[in-house]
Amino acid sequence: MTTIHVEETPHLAYVLRLADSALINSHRLSEWCGHAPMLEEDLALANIALDLLGQARLLYEHAAALEGRGRSEDDLAYLRDAPQFKNLLITELPRGDFAFTIVRQTLLSAFFHPFWQLARGSSDRTLAAIAGKAEKEVAYHLRHAGAWLVRLGDGTEESRKRTVEALETLWPYTGELFEVDAVGEAMIEAGIAPDPASVRPVFEQTIDRLLAEAGLARPVAAWMQTGGLRGVHTEHLGHLLAVMQHLQRAYPGAVW
Amino acid sequence: MYSQALNERIEGPRIVEDPEKLAAFQARIDAEERIEPNDWMPEAYRRTLIRQISQHAHSEVVGMLPEGNWITRAPSLRRKAALLAKVQDEGGHGLYLYAAAETLGVSREELYEQLLSGKAKYSSIFNYPTLTWADIGCIGWLVDGAAIMNQIPLCRTSYGPYARAMIRICKEESFHQRQGYEIMLTLCRGTPEQKAMAQDALNRWWWPSLMMFGPPDSESRHTEESMRWKIKRFTNDELRQKFVDATVPQGHYLGLTFPDPELRFDEATGHWRFGRIDWEEFKRVLAGHGPCNRERMAARRKAHEEGAWVREAVLAHAAKRRARERAQKIAAE
């Protein structure tokens, strides 16, 4: 099937962003399955990936309903190309080592936990319901990733070095979490989306508490990466989609 | 899954057991009592179980690789979720089987070391590659189907912790088997290309699936003792025949052809008769010369080596915590 074109209203664009971030984050985590440092982590990372995949599916279903053209979750996930994906850049970066994965998941969970808590009050009833489920899941993700961040930061010289390295690489991607463009403004205005500015204090408090416990310092970013919300990605997303969408693209129209 | 372990010679010094204890043990087995970790048991029984349970655990863990190969390429979000959950289940099976083996006085680390060094075996089936999406269907349908044939009797095996682990594993495996068959059904009802994909996968997985039950009874060395101790309740050939009888009609319902010109229904016995299994191939793959043996072991070793710094960090952090707690306690006193 050829690439589809989605006529994006601000509401639809907003829901797709959340769906894309959840899906791409899930994809990167799923790459660990069978290759983690210990069997327990094969299970735990797969669990988090499954939660995020579940969130993505609900969000795509909601997006498809908002579009009202009879498309499915799979059309939205498999038949859009990289510039149409609006996920946060931080989610698409290659899986890296275990420290990289843990730092990324801590940052994302520290943001999305308070985010989903606030989104429970969304005027979009479906989004509010998804938020209710996601909030509980992400609370667990934060506990798991946060505990690992502390272990790795306050572990050996090597684990500390790797964690600091990951933190410095990833920190410039946290700016995007708080970006508000015209779509975001319209959604906040309509009471559909929480204002990320109100998420920021909780995010910073969580990160500072975990970093203090891990004996690490919050990096100072001279600048922040941006682009995901506009579909301007890193070099990595195209490769990820080439893998993920392979069968749907190779056998157009087939049902799996 | 994988009773191939029962066909290998158990190493170690020969131990002469106390005949009275041995007789009492056999009486308990004959009375269908479960043997528990703290009960007396013959050394050969313990060794056989450690060998079998750990080989089963290793098979689950190595088995994560061929199916994991398709997680990022699953063709729909529903299939992706099901596959990821399935591979996760296999890791879970590995975990509780290692735990069951630990009740026999051996550590998970020691067992895992045996896998990584190549001393311990795992099921030969996982040394075959997963080349198309239909392979994921075939693994569920045939490989998990064969596993279930092996495992259902193991739910009544004489060693308690193993039997209990198997009950849970069987429930999950039968779910996997249904999922796999459903993938095959969808492919066979799909486009001609999808159906060809399903046929190709059956051609490649059929014979290796039959080999999963281990060598024929005539060549199986340890069946008798394992049967007497009720570790094993059916012979390799009995289980293989049950599997063929159950599976052939399923394949025909899919509209697929089995890659065996000698396959025919025997009216007199009610069994499906099948052609000769290539035992040379089986032996070759078990000996390390299958399509993916080296890759599978390299992947397991790589994950283990790359994870070493993480496991060291966990221990270092735990030690630091304990030291801090001690210091706090002393300061408080």
Image (cartoon, grey):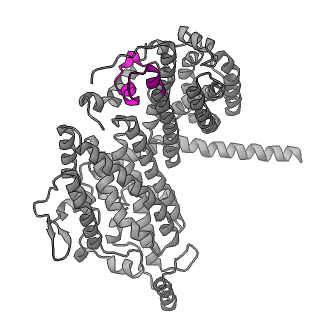
Q: What is the span of residues highlighted in magenta in the rendered image?
A: A62-85
In this rendering, would B127 be left or right of B172? left
Q: Quadrant of the N terminus of chain B?
A: bottom left
Give above or below for A7 relative to B204.
above
Residue B229, picture quadrant: bottom left
Asked if residue B287 is positioned above or below residue B131 in the image, the reply reads below
Q: Is residue B77 above or below residue A191?
A: below
The furthest residue to the left: B261
Q: Is residue A167 visible?
A: yes
Q: Is residue B54 magenta?
A: no
Q: Pick whichever, A131 or A21, lies toward us.
A: A131
Residue A239 position by quadrant: top left
- Residue A74 on the magenta span: yes
Query: Where is residue B208 drawn, in percent x and y?
Result: 24, 57
- What is the x, y in percent for residue A13? 48, 16
Which SS does the magenta portion mostly show? helix
User: What residue appears at the point 89 percent right and 48 percent down from the top-left corner?
Assistant: B333
